[in-house]
Image: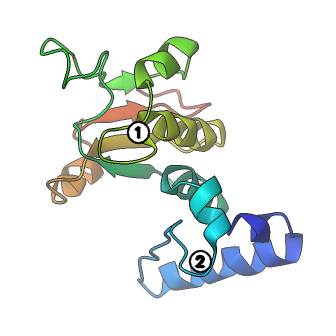
């Protein structure tokens, strides 16, 4: 997908394809783990891919599901007093430092989630990072409940 974004015509076709699928009521599933390209396995990640697709389709919101309730002020598996950060108004070096290194279960951890949030929010798309254990919590998000960590989009006067 990344190479298609560098070509204006391919980018337009990709955007039209996503928009048409959405118009049909289809939720496109895009995964970085492309079975025909080993380069993507080495250079990419699904977090940043999700932000890129969100930009491409001019999404209203990017929701990233993970195995924790959101971004914490320290590692909750190491610090029982770690506190969930409910809102991030700006991605600062302090927020990047809290994200730490790779996660125990995946290769990206919160560093790539923060990078993806930065991509999306800088394009005006707010981001929520939340636990994917209960997918029905997405309904709560859509009804405006505070779930996980909300990253305020640039230019967003709310939150």
| Viewport quadrant of the C terminus | top left
Marking on residue 65: none
Instruction: Give 84 or 89, whichever is nearer the viewer.
Output: 84
Quadrant of residue 84 within the rendered picture: top left
Residue 92 horizontal/vertical position (percent)? 56, 16
Instruction: Give 65 or 17, whichever is nearer the viewer.
Output: 65
Which circle's residue, 1 or 2, is located before the other in the chain?
2
Quadrant of residue 154 within the rendered picture: top right
Tell me the residue that label 2 is attached to.
19
| Viewport quadrant of the N terminus | bottom right
Q: Is residue 24 above or below residue 153?
A: below
Q: Residue at x 50, y 12 (%)?
A: 94
Q: Is residue 76 left or right of residue 47?
A: left
Q: Residue at x 21, y 15 (%)?
A: 82
Marking on residue 109: 1
Q: Secondary structure at mark 2?
A: helix
Q: Is residue 151 left or right of residue 130?
A: right
Q: Residue at x 27, y 43 (%)?
A: 144
């Amino acid at each position: 997908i990344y190479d298609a974004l560098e070509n204006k015509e391919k980018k337009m076709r990709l955007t039209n394809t996503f928009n048409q699928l959405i118009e049909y009521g289809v939720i496109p599933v895009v995964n970085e783990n492309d079975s025909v390209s080993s380069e993507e396995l080495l250079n990419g990640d699904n977090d940043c891919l999700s932000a890129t697709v969100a930009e491409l389709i001019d999404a209203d919101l990017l929701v990233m599901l993970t195995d924790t309730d959101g971004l914490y002020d320290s590692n909750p598996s190491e610090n029982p007093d770690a506190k969930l950060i409910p809102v991030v108004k700006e991605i600062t070096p302090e927020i990047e430092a809290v994200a730490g290194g790779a996660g125990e279960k995946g290769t990206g951890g919160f560093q790539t989630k923060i990078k993806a949030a930065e991509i999306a929010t800088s394009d005006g798309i707010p981001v929520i990072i939340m636990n994917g254990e209960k997918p029905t919590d997405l309904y709560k998000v859509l009804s405006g409940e505070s779930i996980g960590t909300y990253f305020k989009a640039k230019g967003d006067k709310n939150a």
